[in-house]
Amino acid sequence: MERLNLPFIAKRRSECKLTLQEMAESLGFRNASTYLKYEKGEYDFKANHLPILAKKLKCGLHELFMIIFLLF
């Protein structure tokens, strides 16, 4: 199972010196607070957000995900 690696997204944004507002505007949001809710996991990023995120964060799409192993 794969999930978005939200800590990676936040860390990478900081490394790239991108503000919450810059990220919000790139995804079509008005407010930094809206983007922050996505980055914190309160809202789910949509599929169409992912290529934009990867481009802004200068990373591959695969880097936005982490693999979760479920043991039964």
Image: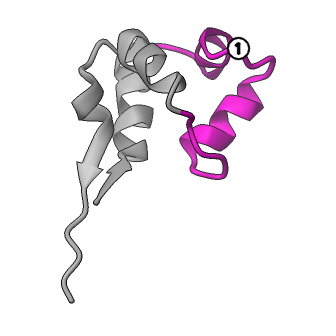
- Residue 15, percent from left and from top: 34, 21
Q: Quadrant of residue 5?
A: top left
The residue that label 1 is drawn on is 28
Q: Count the marks: how many? A: 1
Up-down relation of residue 58 to residue 68 (above or below):
above
Residue at the far right in the pictured view: 30
In the image, 50: left or right of 28? Answer: left
Amino acid type at circle 1 is Gly
In the image, 63: left or right of 35? Answer: left
- Residue 11, percent from left and from top: 37, 33
Residue 67 located within the stretch drawn in magenta: no
Q: Quadrant of residue 23?
A: top right
Q: Measuring 29% from the left and 26% from the top, which residue is drawn there?
A: 61
Start and end of the magenta stretch? 17-46
- Residue 56, percent from left and from top: 42, 11
- Residue 3, percent from left and from top: 37, 52
Q: Measuring 53% from the left and 24% from the top, which residue is drawn there?
A: 49
Residue at the far bottom in the pictured view: 72
Q: Quadrant of the C terminus?
A: bottom left
Q: How is the image coloured?
A: one colour
Disc 1 crowd rating (10 Å Cα; few below 14, some 14-19, many 20+) is few
Secondary structure under badge 1? loop
- Of residue 53 and residue 12, the one placed in the foreground of this image is 53
Residue 19 located within the stretch drawn in magenta: yes
Q: Quadrant of the N terminus?
A: bottom left
In the image, 49: left or right of 33? Answer: left
Q: Measuring 19% from the left and 83% from the top, which residue is drawn there?
A: 71
